[in-house]
């Protein structure tokens, strides 16, 4: 079975075939963050979805180039730079860094390219010049350059490829200057915005006069530069279909005369406790807010990955608590398998059991079915249940444990939970104890802060020195900090309470 995805352009689930004649290379562009604040949990749903698409493509054997732009000049940013009396770079730099930290905390693979709009002004200007030369863009009396929808349509091009728009109600020549606007205001949109006093120091020289780019042209210029005039996949949240993506298509196809993107993928929105997120309702969360409540990036990722990308997802704190227990079910099974196998994961080289082969096949089929994630989880948890049964009955061979661990590694390449099989080994490295000696396992390596790891090591040392009083005192101290130590015949386990 081949990978199938819902293409907004054709409004149907289609088999994915890359443009590359060798069918190997895939270009994927995801509209990145507007760095004017910390990204919220809704934004993260979209970026985790993009990560899932990339991982699925890589799992399917494609060689993906993943590009995610950084929108570092745009209406909202300029407003805040003005309010906070700071510079553009200083202001956007801190939110960009925070975004990349959060991306990592959520287990997302880093995009191969992260172009900043402010570093592509020359490409943006060149694209606008092309549009002017082709007669589909014009300079208005205010010095700004606009895209003419009427002229574009006059060339036989289609505006409204992603959404059905009522273009008959459009009044020719009507303009919209802001970066975001409603469907009702289908109107000529700004490509280049002439400098106004409110822009402060945020402006660049151009053949059209001093000013700055509109948001939509930034993405056209950066995606074409990174991936070429026609590329495979373009992603974003559903709110970007109009005007942002529709305008990206018009600008790109208007300039190149070629189809812009083969597959458009849009992720549905996220609600919190059933409502649109808003600061006034108290249901607005950044990732940092959730980490401060004691949840981990992995738990948030898991929860965001429980719903199909085309379904509106209702995010709740109860759901997040449920994510914690679902993850520990998987982790517990993996830990048992690991104890059983008791070897370096990298060295697993055993034939794969038929149980695992079947699970992996079902896992792949579910994924290829337009990323049917609930079925994917169904397969994973059924497989975990079966493994637990065999473990409980003590009928699992050492090689079967290894086969299961290798299978999980493959599945986790897509899920990105990094439930650390290696954490046990890493702790052994830290403590200098050979894998066959004390097995000190940390449930999810990032979960154990350095202070806890250090206490664990001190306890191991105390036990080695047969200082049981000190060893017990450290155990109590860890308990007070929310961690329990279990001494098992195989070694020491550290668990979060
Ligand atoms: P922005 O930084 O505002 O440009 O948004 C970054 C990404 O987050 C875009 O792809 C948006 O479509 C997406 N996004 C914004 N709000 C939500 C939400 N509530 N649920 C899902 N995605 C969202
Ligand atoms: Zn974009």
Image: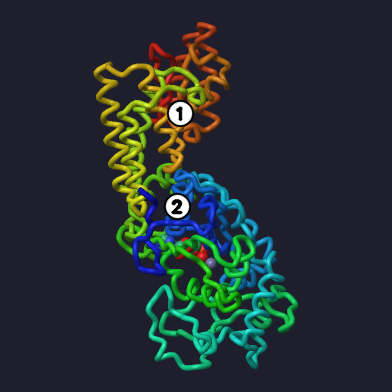
The reply, left or right, for residue 83 in relation to residue 393 is right
Q: Residue at x 63, y 84 (%)?
A: 134
State the residue in front, 104 or 473.
Answer: 104
In contact (CB < 8 Å): disc 1 and disc 2 = no
Q: Residues within 10 Å of mark 1 (few under 14, many from 20)?
A: many
**Residue named by callout 2:** 53
Q: CA distance from mark 1 to mark 2?
A: 24 Å
Q: Residue at x 46, y 59 (%)?
A: 43
Work out whether residue 35 can be spotted.
Answer: yes
Work out whether residue 295 can be spotted.
Answer: no
Up-down relation of residue 131 to residue 464 (above or below): below
Give whichever of discs 1 and 2 has the lower sequence position: 2
The reply, left or right, for residue 60 in relation to residue 147 is left
Instruction: Tell me residue 452's x, y (percent).
Output: 51, 28
Up-down relation of residue 28 to residue 247 (above or below): above
Q: Residue at x 35, y 28 (%)?
A: 332
Q: Secondary structure at mark 1?
A: loop
**Residue named by callout 1:** 421
């Amino acid at each position: 079975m081949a990978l199938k995805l819902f293409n907004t352009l054709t409004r149907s689930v289609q088999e994915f075939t890359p443009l590359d004649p060798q069918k190997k290379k895939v270009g994927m562009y995801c509209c990145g963050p507007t760095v004017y604040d910390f990204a919220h949990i809704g934004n993260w749903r979209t970026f985790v979805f993009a990560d899932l698409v990339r991982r699925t493509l890589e799992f399917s054997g494609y060689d993906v180039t993943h590009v995610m732009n950084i929108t570092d000049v745009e209406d909202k940013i300029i407003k805040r730079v003005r309010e906070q009396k700071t510079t553009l770079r200083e202001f956007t730099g801190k939110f960009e860094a925070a975004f990349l930290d959060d991306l990592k905390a959520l287990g997302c693979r880093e995009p191969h390219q992260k172009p900043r709009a402010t570093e592509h002004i020359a490409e943006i200007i060149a694209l606008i010049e092309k549009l002017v030369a082709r007669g589909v863009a014009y300079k208005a009396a205010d010095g700004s350059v606009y895209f003419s929808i009427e002229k574009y349509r006059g060339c036989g091009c289609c505006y409204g490829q992603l959404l059905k728009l009522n273009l008959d109600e459009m009044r020719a020549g009507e303009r919209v200057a802001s970066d975001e606007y409603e469907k009702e205001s289908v109107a000529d949109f700004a490509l280049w915005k002439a400098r106004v006093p409110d822009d402060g120091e945020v402006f660049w020289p151009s053949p059209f006069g001093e000013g700055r780019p509109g948001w939509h042209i930034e993405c056209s210029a950066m995606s074409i530069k990174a991936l070429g005039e026609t590329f495979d996949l373009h992603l974003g949240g559903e709110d970007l279909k109009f005007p942002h993506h529709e305008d990206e298509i018009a600008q790109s196809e208007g300039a190149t005369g070629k189809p812009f993107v083969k597959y458009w993928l849009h992720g549905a929105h996220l609600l919190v406790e059933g409502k649109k997120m808003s600061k006034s309702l108290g249901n607005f969360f950044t990732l940092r807010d959730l980490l401060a409540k004691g949840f981990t990036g992995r738990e948030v990722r898991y929860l965001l990955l429980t719903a199909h990308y085309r379904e509106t997802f209702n995010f709740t704190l109860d759901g997040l608590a449920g994510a914690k227990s679902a993850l520990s079910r998987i982790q517990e099974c993996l830990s048992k398998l690991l104890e059983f196998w008791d070897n370096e994961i990298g060295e697993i080289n055993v034939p794969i059991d038929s149980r695992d082969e079947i699970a992996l096949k079902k896992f792949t089929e579910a994924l290829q079915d337009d990323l049917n994630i609930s079925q994917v989880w169904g397969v994973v948890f059924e497989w975990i249940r079966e493994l637990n049964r065999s473990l409980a009955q003590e009928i699992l061979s050492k090689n079967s444990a290894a086969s299961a661990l290798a299978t999980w590694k493959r599945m986790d390449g897509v899920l990105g939970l990094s439930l650390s099989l290696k954490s046990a080994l890493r702790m052994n490295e830290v403590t200098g104890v050979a894998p066959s000696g004390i097995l000190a396992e940390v449930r999810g390596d990032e979960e154990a802060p350095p202070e806890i790891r250090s206490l664990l090591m001190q306890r191991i040392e105390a036990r080695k020195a047969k200082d049981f009083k000190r060893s017990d005192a450290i155990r109590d101290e860890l308990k007070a900090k929310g961690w329990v130590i279990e001494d098992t015949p195989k070694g020491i386990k550290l668990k979060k309470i």
